[in-house]
Amino acid sequence: MTKRVYIYDSTLRDGAQTQGVNFTVVDKQDIARELDQLGVDYIEGGWPGANPTDDAFFRAVPKLDTAKMVAFGMTHKAETSAANDPGLNALINTGVKQVCIVGKSSAFHVQNVLGVSLKANLQMVSDSIAYIKKKKVEAFFDAEHFFDSYKANPEYALSVAKTAYDSGARWVILCDTNGGTLPHEIDKIVRDVAKIIPGDHLGIHCHNDTENAVANSLTAVQAGVRQVQGTMGGVGERCGNANLFSIIPNLMLKMGYETGVSKQGLKQLTRIANRLEERIHLNRARHLPYVGASAFAHKGGLHVSAVVKDPSSYEHINPDMVGNERIILISDQAGKSNIMSRLTSVGIKVDDKDPAVKRKIKALTDEIKERENQGYAYDVADASFEILARRFLESVPEYYHLKSFRVIDERRWNAKGELITLSEATTKIVLDDKEVMTVAEGNGPVNALNLSLKKALARKYKSLKNMRLRDYKVRIVTPEAGSGAVTRVLIETADKEGNRWCTVGVSTNIIDASYNALHDAIVYKLLHSK
């Protein structure tokens, strides 16, 4: 049997069920692009017809280079035929060429939740898959509660899976929906299923309620399945889903399987983990395997000197393989190799053998460590990192000097009796030795400040007219400080040429943090506009 395993990412749907997570369309588009660059095979975009965000996303699915976009839904309802089912047609009408439908595999659920006969459920599965195939769309079948169902009534659970396969499903995915199955049970049941459905048509989807989702997924692969579903970082409802940040490197580096992720793609894993963390505003555990900030951190103690001389004796892989870095917490060696890699990635070439350059890199490394201790996040703010690095290693022009800014918010009833909120920003800058003052109104303080700055600067720097704020994220870095907490602001900016860049600002004042990020965004644009 082939050693190729297909990776199916359901972050955009399952991840959206995480408590506290609400994806915007822009979030979903950007995460899809990241997953595509990583090299996953399938991206589950959401459930068309379930909510306005998913509907809007499927109207604006980003261009993908290798990954295939999947629309998720369910079998047709008992009271309609497949051809006349609105939900099923909503999936097909998205225009994507892969559709995954969930169906009941539990005899108990069929009779007590759907309220139909066991035979009728099999017919719904068969008709739904056949209808999708008729529309020349690749069909996947998600066998809900499969493992619990198998334990209670193996004959019926198998009949549901076999019906989906016989009706033309490219993949039949066995779901541990409650997350309560253990690895030894997964192994036995998957091997039983593989006797009637070829492994290269079987998938696994595990929830993490017993902290076994990754182990269960890997066990299922060993037992024969060739598609693994999960989410980035294991996000999802309750205890989450199988964590693809662990599954992918385990498959590739430990078990010898091929995936759509290349060795170069694997090096993007930590960067993508950092970007996802910021985008969904979740604190990822520092000790998360492979991609956690402490995954390769070594504290002062008996084995530090051994780690420096022979890292392989205390690390199961080279951290560079997954884009992470080794950290000796009491040593000035922490982060240097990563800094060099980042410098290369942003186009800064340095001779690290030159003693003067080495001193500058050391100073830059120390500065970044200090700033990240204050709350900065340069892993996700490449533009701010580049500006800081160039200030240490080269020079960055002072395109303007800010003297002051002031932002005023007003909430009032207008002449039509409507409650409105307006923001007004006044900026004073020095440009070519002349003071320039501008005023602009916006729909929020950051929007007003951005417009006021651009209004002043665009008189000289015409290229700023085509840049716009694409995304704005705020995160409280020190929640224990209450209203005096440190705030981190991430701003993503884009221009008409299709370039996008991310900058970061940190302050106890959210407007001040926003200005810092705005300033870097403007400087970055001017640097690259020459």
Image (spheres, rainbow, N blue to C red):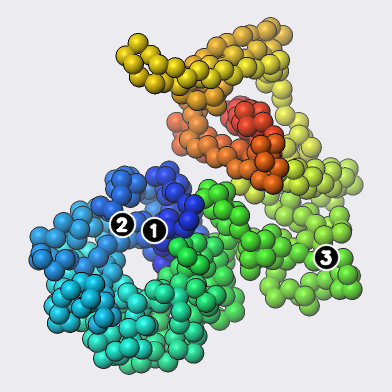
Label 2's element? loop
Label 1's element? loop
| Above/below status of 496 relative to 305 | above
| Above/below status of 243 relative to 281 | below
* Residue annotated with mark 3: 299
Amino acid of disc 1: Arg
Q: For label 3, count other residues whose C-alpha is less than 10 Å away and answer few (under 14), some (14-19) or many (20+).
A: few
Tell me the residue at 21%/82% (across/down): 163
Q: For label 2, count other residues whose C-alpha is less than 10 Å away and answer few (under 14), some (14-19) or many (20+).
A: many
**CA separation in Å, label 2 and label 3:** 45 Å
**CA separation in Å, label 2 and label 1:** 7 Å
Expressed as whole percent of the image width and height from the top left, the position of residue 190 reads 39, 87
| Quadrant assignment for the N terminus | bottom left
Expressed as whole percent of the image width and height from the top left, the position of residue 39 reads 47, 62
Q: Residue 192: name its quadrant.
A: bottom left
Q: Residue 329: name its quadrant.
A: bottom right
In the displayed structure image, the side of residue 160 where residue 11 appears, left or right: right
Nearer to us in this view, 50 or 9: 50
* Residue annotated with mark 1: 13
Tell me the residue at 87%/45% (across/down): 359
* Residue annotated with mark 2: 47
Label 3's element? loop
Does residue 527 appear in this view?
no
Q: Which mark is residue 64?
A: none
Task: For the residues labelled 2 and 1, say whether their Cβ atoms are less than 8 Å apart.
Answer: yes
In the displayed structure image, the side of residue 484 where residue 261 appears, left or right: left
Q: Earlier in the sequence, mark 3 or mark 1?
A: 1
Amino acid of disc 3: Lys
Expressed as whole percent of the image width and height from the top left, the position of residue 505 reads 66, 35
